[in-house]
Image: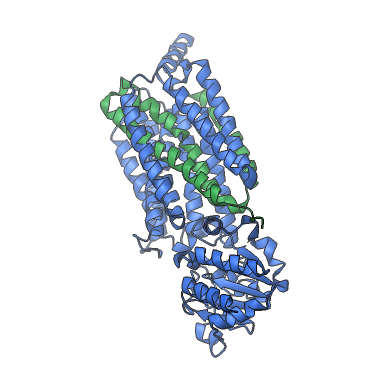
Amino acid sequence: MGSSLTSNLFVFILAAFLGYEVVRRVSPQLHTPLMSLTNAISAISVVGAITIAGSHRGGVLLMSLGAIAVACAMINVVGGFMITDRMLKMFKKRKDK
Amino acid sequence: MVAAAKTTALHAATTWPHTAHWPWYVTLVYMAAAVMFALSLKWLSSHKTARRGVKIGEIGMAAAILATLFLPEVRQYNWIFAGAVIGAAIGVLLAVLTPMTAVPQQTALSHAFGALAAALVGTAEFYGHHAQLTAGSTAAIGLESLLGYLTFTGSLIAAGKLQEVLPTRPISYPLQNPINLSVLAAAVACGVWMCISPHIVFLYPVFVGLSLLFGVLLIIPIGGGDMPTVIALLNSYAGLSASAMGFVVNNKLLIIAGALEGSSGFILSMIMCQAMNRSFLNVLFGQAANGKSAPADDVYGGKIRTTTAEEVADILASARRVVIVPGYGLAVAQAQHVTGELFELLDSKGVDVQFAIHPVAGRMPGHMNVLLAEADIPYDRLQEMEQINEQFADVDVVIVNGANDVVNPDARDNPGSPIAGMPILNVDKARIVVVIKRSLSPGFAGIANPLFARDNCLMLFADGKKATLDIIQEVKKL
């Protein structure tokens, strides 16, 4: 855990900094889609849930916990990207007359 | 001694965490996905590339999920498949059926789902490995569970308040802050005890219970007006809980994606706090702002001038520059589409119409922009506060619909006001201000608005949608 903790912390700090720099440039007009998009992206936690739901070492109880976690994360994977796109589609430039 | 350390290290590598035997291609796919997630957010910086951002995010996500299914420890697919199908179905329904006015509560719900996923994985990791847990790994699981479970209940409460199935006003009780902080302290103490003796299994459910309770206590004292800040803060917590999960299962892709959401939510809540001139602590601990405002009778007494839709239409007919200020009241009255019609009508008559959007207009950051975009108002007509504030002196008519505190000149002029220092839209500098409002009732800040008593201000007392429809009719008659 020791060395992986420090290297994980290293990655976390860099990613938080990257997030700060990237998100700062997002137009305030798009802050609602930004929130739903980041929410969809962090639903990558489905990956961790999959390893629990698919590993039979832990027995049925843990696999079912994993399956619920997969379901929760998949709601955000699918719903998050879809609603973000639905919102972005509505932003239109002035119609030419 | 050395040999013993080696055996321990070997033991740890083969049992937990799992990454030691990942195939190289999974790591490569995860790396590519991390880059795609960062690009996805980067492309959101401009309207032109925003939808491309969603696409690349989806590709990264699909690739990472596929690669994970090939991991050697994933041996059984039926539980995964069942969970994925159910989750995807609910996700599609939520994304398609949620009306744009309800996006804030949908967002709060999705924070709850994301946090619950992280929390459940933490729970599974604890029970699946508690024989091998060290202080460090218990701490990571503890952090993941604490953040996950408190964000889960906190987001549910926030969603309930936004949907108005729970009371939107702050709920308070004696000794609120000491009680809340002792619940948090108890949870942390329990967590520390778990780290010292990971083998005492009964501590974990107590810890989870305290985390769930703290999430509820954290959000119930917060009022409806502070929801934009709170929802952004919960966004940040949801990200952090996903990141904590990355620490637990030793997956850097989760750490990165969670950190991106964590810092995004953090930035948004900072922006919301600045837009209300309040501090984080002030919002979280539900303190009412200090300062005194004049009683409504003194401010308004005999100085209110009312108007009619007909008169407003006359004024608009001779205007060249019009600015519309939409507030949350406009969304409540479902007036965004008729406002779009009014825009089209005035635009076709050659009037320059802009929309002035205060950062906290609506129930979450950027909400008002989405509502107006849905009403087919072109986004280049939507102006941010800083851009439009310098221009109000050149504006003929301002129509304020459903906004109150964000146009209260007291925030700028009266240092003793409870909202002193809050950035506002300087609509009082325009030639004529028309305020559409049901009555003189105060906004979230609960104070009188001297704007309504100004000489250049006309009040149109009506429902936001009906008033806009009436104005459209009268303009058409001209």
Residue at figure coordinates x 35%, y 24% from the top left:
A54
Image location (x, y in percent) of residue B190: 36, 40
Tell me the shade of chain A: green
Q: Nearer the viewer, residue B168 or B178?
A: B168
- Compared to B63, does B2 lie above or below? above
Name of the residue lying farthest toward the bottom: B302
* Residue B415 visible in image: no
Q: Is residue A61 left or right of residue B101?
A: left
Residue at figure coordinates x 52%, y 58% from the top left:
B371
Image location (x, y in percent) of residue B428: 65, 76
Residue at figure coordinates x 55%, y 21% from the top left:
B28
Q: Nearer the viewer, residue A13 or B410?
A: B410
Image location (x, y in percent) of residue A82: 47, 42
* Residue B134 visible in image: yes
Quadrant of the image occupied by residue A63: top left
Q: Is residue B381 left or right of residue B95?
A: right
Name of the residue lying farthest toward the top: B3
Image location (x, y in percent) of residue A16: 58, 38
Name the quarter where the C terminus of chain B is drawn: bottom right
Q: Which chain is blue?
A: B
- Compared to A6, does B54 lie above or below? below
Residue at figure coordinates x 34%, y 33% from the top left:
B83
- Compared to B448, does A37 lie above or below? above
